[in-house]
Image (tube, rainbow, N blue to C red):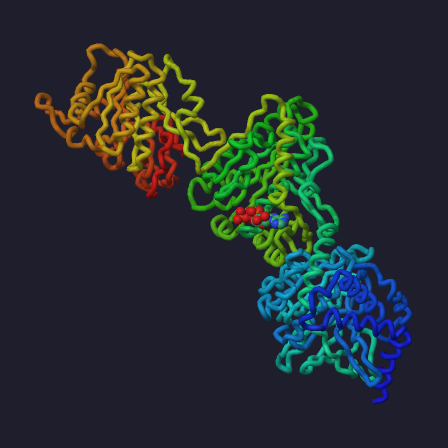
């Protein structure tokens, strides 16, 4: 008993000796600020907060029985706001303890390698309040930038930290994690932090405070224990509730190091001996029960959040402008490209496309900030390097507008002069077209190196006057490319593999971004061969799948931060950076884009743009506008090819048997395609030199047929309307050799050929031949006399029947398939693995004579609604 009494005396004497009146005054202040429930918020002034912080520091230096002289700051001159750098131990108040001699603050040693454990978890409201109070006190005491708090609450799903929400909202406190998986992620971050701090022999840069509202289990508890043993240089402080966990007597939980243990006894707490010191001779801790401070009043938290939020924002403010160089376009990309992408604490972090990290893999769940991160990178690069040093290919597969701001629009004519092609809501086929284009560029560069007799791109750049910019190709949601084990996916894999393997030597760099890698590995056993070439991994929140399976540090990342790993995701190579939100700085981004655009060389071309959702009109096609009479072979234009340049999709109609056009499918777009094909051939003939026989056989096409007829007539062409019977008769005529070969071309334009089935089935009374017999002869011989059929069939079966079976399918060599199932089409064409999925605004162009198969955007008339029912 006398030992205990001596301890009390020591505690109280320490205070008395150290200007007890000052301590008492501060205690009173503390009580006023922290303990009075329902306190009038008007009384909590900035001054109160300042003084609270001051108290934090005084308490920190005035450990019981320690250096009492440290109290000598004097109440009149409280230490300045947030001064604690948390490099060594600090003492933080838990509550008050009392003896017969009076009350004194009960302090616990934290930081500097000291930790705290509570035997009840945060489901105990007093424990929850204590955790909140400790976080508030430490935040209040810490110098801005010196303390980072990560909190986990699997016990109450985050409820423990709800009262601290103003601090979370202000960015002072990271969003607490609530799942065991995310707790593992926090431990990863803490371990990484410890490793980095220990490595760097200098003082710790930042204290990481890990607050766990309950004790993790199994391996994670072992990891937590290891952190408590890591010592002061690790810069980690653990506060864990619910330790030791209830466990069978046989299983002893891993021992925590340098940890004060608190035992909850009803509404009191019993404080164990601080690490390395003792209150008692027998090691039983402080022999006075501690009445824990209650919750910090909400108004106080709000004030603190406002002040700290401001300071934090100012101290660590990271705006889009911070990523930009002083002067645009001054860097050379000979040895690589580099740009700043954000900060780790206060340290700026640069990433590079060079020999070490030629390609990047970016992962993160939807909404994790992938687009923003990519925009930061792209604008950072575009501001540093001129278009002679950098070219961009941007490809986005998702619905949205990731890269839309890089291309001119009706409202804003500017574009990023580095952008060569931009795909928005792209098709997989467009993706493959871009990859093919990149391979062509790679081959061009390989040939140029050979020609110049050099082996390195840098040497080629020195030897040649032609700029050879480094190429960065960004593919957002690239997993879409692999969706479906078909020819498109296979080609994409092959191209990606080649580009990833050889790109480094030729200055072609890939950035693949995705929300998920699952599926890709299952489909192709090629994960390693492709992704092994992507040493730089950028994991945003939820992006662990791009890291090594043992590296789940991305689990607890807050929005606006990314884990950078230049070792293909291996654990222990992580750096967490914060990156600015380019979306939030819209005006600055637009200003930069305009500035770069103004700097473009005169005559620079805007990027080729593919917008997957946009329909296309023949009138806008430069090829169409350039058509004039007199060409050697008339071209029937049907749409735009889904390729990098969106080239015109057409069929040359020459004298080869079978040069006719069949548009197939029930989609009303069929009539529009026929309209475009007819108008395009009409532009290539002088009026009067050609005949158009127009058969509108189905009601759905009447409007289009009338428009076609009117447009032809307006252009001065001769147009004759046919019904089914007249069509049958004309087909009979054209099955015979004309009296005068090459009297001029004739185009039979039939809207709904299938509707002529009955008429074509009739036999000629003289020749006994059916219209179908005549049709087949006409199809073979007609082109030789300048007769071409342009027809829309609504079913593939009807077309096959009209031709007399698949054997005759070359009799109409030019096909535009709309909503025809890929398997049916493949069977008809004799191509079993045909990769075609019918969808609105797309068609497949097949030219049987030159073995061309292309996905196209078929022409529609302006105002045509996209077909439904796919
Ligand atoms: N650095 C940041 N700081 C603050 N907020 C950010 C930051 N980066 C992104 N955000 C916000 O997160 C939200 C999602 O960002 P973003 O659109 O980039 O995500 P995403 O991963 O591309 O999502 P999705 O895949 O659904 O398109 C946006 O509202 C954005 O403002």
Quarter of the image for the N terminus: give it.
bottom right
Rendered view: 416 above or below 47: above
Rendered view: 707 above or below 290: above
Between 294 and 324, the one lying in front of the other is: 294
> Residue 144, image x and y in percent?
76, 56
Position of residue 493 in the picture relative to residue 111 (left or right): left
Position of residue 440 in the picture relative to residue 199 (left or right): left
Q: Residue furthest bottom?
A: 1
Residue 498 lies in quadrant: top right
> Residue 523, image x and y in percent?
47, 49
Residue 188 lies in quadrant: bottom right
Q: Residue at image x 28%, y 12%? A: 688
> Residue 367, image x and y in percent?
55, 51
Between 479 and 439, the one lying in front of the other is: 479
Q: Residue at image x 69%, y 28%? A: 459
Rendered view: 777 above or below 33: above
> Residue 381, image x and y in percent?
65, 37
Q: Is residue 528 visible?
A: no
């Amino acid at each position: 008993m006398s030992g205990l009494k001596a301890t009390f005396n020591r505690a109280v004497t320490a205070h008395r000796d150290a200007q007890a009146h000052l301590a008492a005054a501060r205690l009173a202040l503390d009580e006023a600020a922290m303990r009075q429930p329902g306190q009038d918020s008007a009384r909590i002034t900035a001054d109160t907060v300042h003084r609270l912080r001051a108290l934090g520091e005084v308490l920190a230096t005035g450990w019981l029985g320690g250096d009492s002289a440290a109290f000598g700051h004097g109440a009149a001159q409280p230490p300045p706001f947030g001064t604690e750098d948390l490099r060594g131990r600090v003492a933080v108040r838990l509550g008050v303890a009392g003896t017969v001699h009076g009350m004194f603050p009960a302090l616990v040693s934290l930081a500097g390698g000291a930790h705290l454990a509570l035997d009840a978890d945060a489901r105990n409201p007093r424990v929850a309040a204590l955790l909140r109070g400790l976080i508030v006190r430490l935040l209040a005491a810490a110098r801005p930038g010196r303390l980072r708090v990560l909190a986990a609450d699997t016990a109450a799903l985050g409820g423990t930290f709800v009262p601290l929400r103003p601090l979370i909202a202000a960015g002072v406190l990271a969003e607490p994690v609530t799942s065991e998986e995310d707790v593992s992620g926090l431990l990863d971050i803490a371990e990484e932090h410890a490793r980095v701090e220990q490595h760097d022999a200098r003082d710790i840069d930042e204290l990481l405070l890990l607050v766990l509202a309950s004790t993790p289990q199994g391996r994670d508890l072992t990891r937590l224990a290891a952190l408590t043993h890591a010592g002061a240089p690790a810069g980690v402080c653990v506060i864990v509730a619910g330790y030791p966990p209830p466990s069978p007597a046989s299983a002893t939980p891993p021992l925590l190091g340098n940890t004060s243990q608190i035992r909850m006894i009803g509404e009191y707490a019993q404080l164990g001996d601080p690490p390395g010191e003792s209150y008692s001779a027998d090691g039983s801790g402080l022999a006075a029960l501690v009445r824990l401070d209650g919750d910090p009043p909400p108004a106080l938290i709000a004030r603190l959040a406002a002040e700290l939020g401001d300071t934090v924002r100012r101290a660590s403010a990271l705006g889009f402008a911070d990523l930009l160089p002083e002067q645009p376009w001054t860097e050379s990309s000979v040895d690589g490209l580099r740009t700043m992408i954000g900060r780790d604490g206060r340290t700026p972090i640069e990433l590079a496309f060079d020999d070490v990290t030629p390609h990047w893999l970016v992962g993160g769940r939807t909404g994790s900030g992938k687009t923003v991160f990519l925009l930061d990178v792209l604008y950072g690069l575009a501001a540093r390097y001129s278009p002679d040093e950098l070219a961009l290919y941007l490809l986005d597969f998702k619905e949205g507008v990731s890269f839309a701001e890089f291309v001119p629009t009706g409202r804003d004519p500017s574009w990023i002069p580095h952008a060569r092609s931009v795909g928005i809501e792209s098709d997989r086929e467009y993706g493959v077209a871009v990859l093919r284009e990149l391979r062509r560029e790679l081959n061009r560069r390989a040939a140029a190196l050979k020609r110049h007799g050099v082996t390195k791109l840098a040497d080629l750049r020195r030897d040649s006057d032609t700029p050879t910019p480094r190429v960065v190709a960004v593919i957002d949601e690239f997993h879409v490319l692999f969706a479906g084990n078909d020819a498109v996916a296979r080609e994409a894999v092959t191209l990606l593999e080649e580009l990833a393997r050889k790109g480094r030597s030729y200055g072609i760099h890939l950035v693949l971004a995705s929300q998920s890698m699952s599926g890709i590995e299952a489909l192709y056993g090629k994960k390693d061969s492709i992704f092994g070439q992507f040493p730089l991994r950028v994991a945003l929140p939820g992006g662990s799948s791009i890291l090594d399976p043992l590296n789940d540090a991305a689990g607890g990342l807050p929005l606006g931060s990314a884990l950078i790993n230049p070792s293909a995701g291996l654990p222990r190579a992580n750096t967490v950076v914060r990156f600015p939100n380019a979306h939030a700085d819209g005006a600055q981004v637009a200003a930069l884009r305009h500035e770069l655009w103004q700097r473009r060389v005169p005559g620079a071309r805007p990027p080729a743009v593919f917008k997957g959702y946009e329909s296309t009109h023949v009138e806008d096609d430069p090829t169409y506008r350039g058509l004039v009479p007199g060409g050697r072979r008339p071209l029937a234009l049907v749409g735009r090819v889904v390729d990098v340049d969106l080239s015109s999709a057409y069929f040359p109609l020459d004298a080869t048997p079978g040069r006719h056009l069949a548009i197939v499918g029930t989609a009303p777009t069929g009539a529009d395609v026929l309209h475009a094909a007819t108008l395009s051939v009409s532009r290539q003939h002088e009026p009067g030199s050609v005949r158009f026989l127009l058969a509108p056989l189905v009601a759905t096409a009447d409007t289009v047929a009338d428009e076609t007829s009117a447009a032809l007539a307006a252009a001065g062409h001769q147009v004759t309307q046919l019904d089914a019977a007249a069509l049958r008769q004309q087909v009979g005529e054209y099955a015979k050799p004309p009296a005068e070969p090459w009297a001029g071309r004739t185009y039979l334009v039939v809207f709904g050929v299938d509707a002529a089935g009955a008429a074509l089935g009739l036999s000629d009374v003289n020749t006994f031949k059916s219209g179908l017999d005549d049709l087949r002869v006409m199809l073979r011989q007609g082109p030789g006399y300048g007769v071409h059929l342009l027809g829309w069939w609504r079913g593939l079966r009807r077309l096959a029947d009209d031709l007399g079976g698949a054997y005759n399918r070359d009799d109409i060599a030019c096909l535009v398939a709309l909503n025809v199932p890929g398997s049916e089409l493949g069977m008809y064409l004799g191509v079993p693995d045909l990769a075609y999925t019918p969808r609105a605004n797309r068609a497949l162009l097949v030219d049987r004579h030159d073995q061309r198969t292309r996905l196209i955007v078929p022409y529609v008339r302006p105002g045509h609604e996209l077909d439904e029912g796919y």
